[in-house]
Image: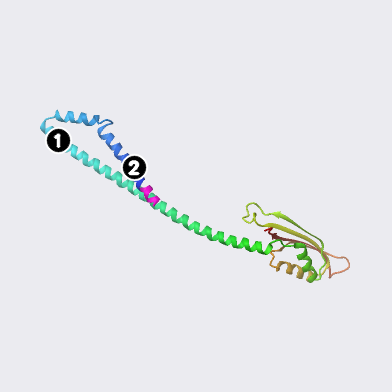
Amino acid sequence: MSVVANFTDKLKSQLQISLGMAKKQLFGTNNEKLDFLMDSFYKLSPNQRTGVLAGGIAGIFLVVVIIFGLYFSLVNGLKSDLSQSFAALHELQSKKAMYEQENRNFEKLADMLERKTKQVSLKPFFEKIANEQSVTLEGLSDSQSPLPADNPLSERIKEVRVEMRMPNISIPRLLGFLVEVEKSNKYLRVQDLQIRARYGTKLYFDAQSKVRGYDSDK
């Protein structure tokens, strides 16, 4: 309703301005032009008065045509503005619905991350998998850092990095350990892996790995 009210007020304002300007042009600021015309009219002969009246009627008709033309031009312009306003309102409502849906999806993702990463004890977690896979871990350490400020999860989730060494390990056992880490449903991913050969054997290697994940303190 506010859009319609604004349209009506704008139309009335434009008409008042147009009529005021027309009145000023025709009669003068204080009707001095009208007084002068009346005095001049009564000084004319009857035939001249008839001609003046005919010309005046024609002039009035022309003014009326101009006023109506201006009126319809303003109405069409305001209708166009009103149509654009409704189109913009509809687009805004559509974008609002899309935003609300995306925001619900984001909240679901954030809640899921928080549930699965809530206060994860990383060292015991990696040591448990290492024992299950018969893997020796050395130099196991973890660190936290905030996510970039432009990341919408930055206020709720932190990034964690875990580093470890796995000496004297076979390739199958190394891969088995890393696969168990990634499929643990803790959003942990191997970010870097270095494998070095050991002197005197082709079956065992020294490996060093960095794992990236997320943690929530809530």
Q: Nearer the viewer, residue 143 or 53?
A: 143
Q: Which residue is mark 2?
A: 14
Q: Is residue 32 above or below residue 57?
A: above
Q: Where is mark 1, residue-wise?
A: 51
Does the magenta run of residues contain 8?
A: no
Please state the extent of the stretch shown in magenta in the rendering. Answer: 1-7
Q: Is residue 151 left or right of residue 195?
A: left
Q: Residue at x 18, y 37 (%)?
A: 55
Q: Which residue is more in the foreground, 125 or 210?
A: 125
Whole-angstrom CA distance, mark 2 to mark 1, is: 35 Å
Q: Amino acid at mark 1?
A: Gly
The residue drawn where x is 13% and y is 35% is 50
Q: How many marks?
A: 2
Which label belongs to residue 114? none
| Figure quadrant of the C terminus | bottom right
Question: Residue 153 in the image: x percent, y percent?
Answer: 63, 56
Q: Earlier in the sequence, mark 2 or mark 1?
A: 2
Q: Report helix, strand or loop for mark 2.
A: helix
In this view, which residue lies farthest toward the right? Answer: 200
Q: Position of residue 167 (x, y in %)?
A: 84, 65
